[in-house]
Amino acid sequence: MAIQNADKNTFKDLIAQDFVIADFYGTTCVPCKLFSKILEDIAAEIPFLNIVKLNTTDNPEIAEELDIHAVPTIHFYKDGQLVDSHVGVMQPQEVKDIIAKYMYA
Amino acid sequence: MKSRVLHAKDFRSIDIKPYVKPFVPDEEALEGELRRLANPHVRWEAGTAVSSGDQVLCALRSGCPRFNRENVRFVAGSSMFHKELEALSIGMSTGETREIDLPEGRVSLTVRSVMNRVVPELTDAMAEALGLEGVSNLEEYRAYLLVQQKEKYLEQAVWEPFQHLRERMLAETEFVLFKEDWQAGMRQKLERCRVLFRQEGIVMEEATERDFEGRIPVKSYHELVAMLQRDEWDTLLMHLLGKYYAQSDGFTVTEADYEQYIADYTKMWHTTEDKAREVDPYDSFVYNEYASHAVHILREYAKTQF
């Protein structure tokens, strides 16, 4: 599984190449835990997918910098560029639709 | 505060059964959660034939540039690449080529390599590895999940019986009430809102409908005052009930509780300690904690009726 935990020092490097899903979550956020499980399922299904998780409670500076005001927020990056984003829990097929749209573009 | 409880209604004598909807386990969700145990143990092994869920590396040939590519990798049946092409690949072997007519034109797909997805059987060791207290095998993990599922259900389902219990308690408990206590509580809540607005650079009395949007479910300052006046009545009664129960169950609110609250508030709202204390001074924290204590007692009792 390609799920990596980022912090303010590593985040930008981790999203710099290829297609990356960034999951911004909070320590006490219950919907975040639900979405985390959905991402784990997707990672187990698609092993070459890059997923980066960032705890906004512990890393408020980068959340501020990226304009993250609610969690979970999901960013989709292609070679470091933000190509799509979503606030709130996404269903598995919604995530896959965005993968299909950008990963092979 | 001069207001107090004169005689508390015994909440156990209030029938809330008509509002209790029994818990029915969601077996499908339970099985899905159990299957998740295998996720970290999924293996990818080089194979020759493609089944649904396998990784496929292929070459595509087509007049359409999108489908004229070398080394395209996807998971067959995942719908993440292309539904029809993924379906076409299922049942193919390494080196084999098949063609399909898509709206974009004819596409030829050659399978270069296959990685078969191998999902191991669930074992007791997988459950034990979770490190959950009291869970050392699959059966115990299933029981644990069932408890979790029920607790989650109760958090939602308890709302209706709790509301009924609360309404009856407030209506049938005898209180001695002083208007100035209600006014003091009201002023406290209003001041809290004023501070919160001020910290965002807004004068509460001049706040517009847009200023309130997403913050408080009112459209004007006057609506806010009316809402706080209405809500404070019940909050005061719940506070008095909380104080009443605390006399016998030993519940107390300490400065350490307050400091923890301020630390949590500061972290959650990314603010300073000073600002957190300005929003919720110690006295208002204590006042609200006793009201929450009464809520807790009634909710926990309502849960036991499921």
Image (tube, rainbow, N blue to C red):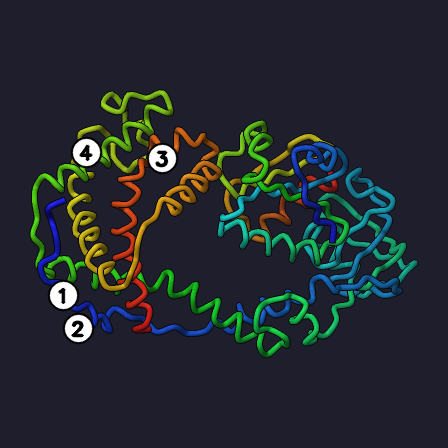
Labels 4, 3: one chain: yes
- For the residue pair B282 and B304, the one nearer the viewer reads as B282
State if disc 2 and disc 4 touch (CB < 8 Å).
no
Residue under numbered circle 4: B187
Q: Name which of mark 4 and mark 2 comes first in the sequence.
A: 2
Helix, strand or loop under label 3 = loop
Labels 1, 2: one chain: yes
Residue under numbered circle 2: B13
Foreground disc of the pair 2, 3: 2
Q: Quadrant of residue B185?
A: top left
Helix, strand or loop under label 1 = loop
Q: CA distance from mark 4 to mark 3?
A: 22 Å
- For the residue pair B206 and B175, the one nearer the viewer reads as B175
Disc 2 residue type (three-letter): Ser
x and y, in percent, of residue B29 in the image:
53, 68
Q: Residue at x 34, y 34 (%)?
A: B215
- For the residue pair B109 and B271, the one nearer the viewer reads as B271
Residue under numbered circle 1: B9
Q: Name which of mark 4 and mark 1 comes first in the sequence.
A: 1
Q: Which mark is residue B214?
A: 3
Query: Subunit of mark 4?
Result: B
State if disc 3 and disc 1 touch (CB < 8 Å).
no
Q: CA distance from mark 2 to mark 3?
A: 40 Å
